Image (tube, rainbow, N blue to C red):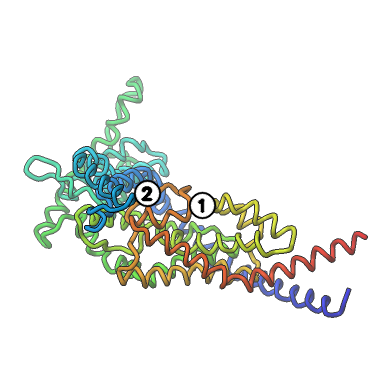
């Protein structure tokens, strides 16, 4: 073994020792936070409820894209195959408007309704209470606190994205108050001879009455003092937080934190548990704005860091592993990972490479995605790129995600251009890593001979 190679191995060992110490310190700080956040019944209930409504957001997003095709006056004039197709699509949307809008109105248009029930259901179950009964009480109280009932009819506009956060708060209050009353035997208990399915609803009867009149009072006080419903008041109080997240800084911070904690083997749920409810609500608000022909308000929408940052960099990295690497291990991992990664499945790539604690991969994995997101945010703020308003299945092929989620072909063009840029940025790092792997594989062969 040459002295030069021994020196490289010694330096690498020292570097690994530093990284291991840094990981230990990071885990000391992050793990308690992750356990506290991940173990919070309220956070888990909100997370589970938002995950449960994702199919509705997908259906609503695709429906609104069908009902409102992204056409221009030039496209409507026809002239080529693509323009003729877009013009025909627009004609179909106009003719089938009522039919196409129904799924949207009943999914994204009622998102807060489903979220309020879901939060109540999952939070009650975490306390080993009847999730269905508690969820129904939460749903009724949300209808009261949102001011949805007017002139004897439920107003659809009160059930959408702006009242999602108010619905969450309402459901948490309802479950905690109902649980307190039930645990202190302030309830109606029927004789044991009564079947459980009949007796169960009576256990929540008193708490239901208390919660219903409580939120009637809170909503009336809110309307009298501010002119807004209780749910709208909650939304206005959260506005400063939403303003901070709905910025270039918010997108870049989320992108970096997700990759950074993954780099050290810590699950990104500690970050996403807080951010995802906001992003899903934002994508619903963007869909509402798109349907109304208004400017989309939120850049911080579900999928933005993945579609315009992380996935592009990851695919560029895996492509280089297949195309330029000489190491048998690196090349084989790249070949095994590229197809799953194309459909959003990252585990073979992250754990096979491995990415975790690999200093060669820090810049490609943590920094390059952030640069991609920065370019996207600049272009989106200038109006060159669209903002996300369509929730797509997570297995949607990555290159067309940006196109379909924004309704603009510029999303696909952005992917192609930034993919090429990322190939150049990542090349030095993957070449250095490949040289190290080739040297180690060569050493292994020599040792066996």
Q: Position of residue 143 (x, y in %)?
A: 20, 45
* Residue with the mark numbered 1: 344
**Viewport quadrant of the C terminus:** bottom right
Kindly identify the residue that appears in the image at 68 percent across and 70 percent down.
431
Which corner quadrant of the image does residue 382 belong to?
Answer: bottom left
In space, the residues marked 1 and 2 are separated at their CA atoms by: 20 Å
* Residue with the mark numbered 2: 50
Q: Is residue 27 left or right of residue 155?
A: right
User: Mark 1: which secondary structure?
Assistant: loop
Kindly identify the residue that appears in the image at 60 percent across and 60 percent down.
319
As rendered, which of 18 and 355 lies closer to the eye?
355
Q: Is residue 44 visible?
A: yes
Q: Mark 1, mark 2: which one is toward the viewer?
A: 1
Q: Is residue 166 visible?
A: no
Q: Position of residue 217 (x, y in %)?
A: 14, 51
Crowd rating for badge 2 (residues with CA inside 10 Å; few <14, some 14–19, many 20+): many
* Upstream in sequence: badge 1 or badge 2: 2
Q: Position of residue 393 (x, y in %)?
A: 42, 47
Crowd rating for badge 1 (residues with CA inside 10 Å; few <14, some 14–19, many 20+): some
Q: Is residue 210 above or below residue 16?
A: above
User: Mark 2: which secondary structure?
Assistant: helix
Kindly identify the residue that appears in the image at 79 percent across and 66 percent down.
440
């Amino acid at each position: 073994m040459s002295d030069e190679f021994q020196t490289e191995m010694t330096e690498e060992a020292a570097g690994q020792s530093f990284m291991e110490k840094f990981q230990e310190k990071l885990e000391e700080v992050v793990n308690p936070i992750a356990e506290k956040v991940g173990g919070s019944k309220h956070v888990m209930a909100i997370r589970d409820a938002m995950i449960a409504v994702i199919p509705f957001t997908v259906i609503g997003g695709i429906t609104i894209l069908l009902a409102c095709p992204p056409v221009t006056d030039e496209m409507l004039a026809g002239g080529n195959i693509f323009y003729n197709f877009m013009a025909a699509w627009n004609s179909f949307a106009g003719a089938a408007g009522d039919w196409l809008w129904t799924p949207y109105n009943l999914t994204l248009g009622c998102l807060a309704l489903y979220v309020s029930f879901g939060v109540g259901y999952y939070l009650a179950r975490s306390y080993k209470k009847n999730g269905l009964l508690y969820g129904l009480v939460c749903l009724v109280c949300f209808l009261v606190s949102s001011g949805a009932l007017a002139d004897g009819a439920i107003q659809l506009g009160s059930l959408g994205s702006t009242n999602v956060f108010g619905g969450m708060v309402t459901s948490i209050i309802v479950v905690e108050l109902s649980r307190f009353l039930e645990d202190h035997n302030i309830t109606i208990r029927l004789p044991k001879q009564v079947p459980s399915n009949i007796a169960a609803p009576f256990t929540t009867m008193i708490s239901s009455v208390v919660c219903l009149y409580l939120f009637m009072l809170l909503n009336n006080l809110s309307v009298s003092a501010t002119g807004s419903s209780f749910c709208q008041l909650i939304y206005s109080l959260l506005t400063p937080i939403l303003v901070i997240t709905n910025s270039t800084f918010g997108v870049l911070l989320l992108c970096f934190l997700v990759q950074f904690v993954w780099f050290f083997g810590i699950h990104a749920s500690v970050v996403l548990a807080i951010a995802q409810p906001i992003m899903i609500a934002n994508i619903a608000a963007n869909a509402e704005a798109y349907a109304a022909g208004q400017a989309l308000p939120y850049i911080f929408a579900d999928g933005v860091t993945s579609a315009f940052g992380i996935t592009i960099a990851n695919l560029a990295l895996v492509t280089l592993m297949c195309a330029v690497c000489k190491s048998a291990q690196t090349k084989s991992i790249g070949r095994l990972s590229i197809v799953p990664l194309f459909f959003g499945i990252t585990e073979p790539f992250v754990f096979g490479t491995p990415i975790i604690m690999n200093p060669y991969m820090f810049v490609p994995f943590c920094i390059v995605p952030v640069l991609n997101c920065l370019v996207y945010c600049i272009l989106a703020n200038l109006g060159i790129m669209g903002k996300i308003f369509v929730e797509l299945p997570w297995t949607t092929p990555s290159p067309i995600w940006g196109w379909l989620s924004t309704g603009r072909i510029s999303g696909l063009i952005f992917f192609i251009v930034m993919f090429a840029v990322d190939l150049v940025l990542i090349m030095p790092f993957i070449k250095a890593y490949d040289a190290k792997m080739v040297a180690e594989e060569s050493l292994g062969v020599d040792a066996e001979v």
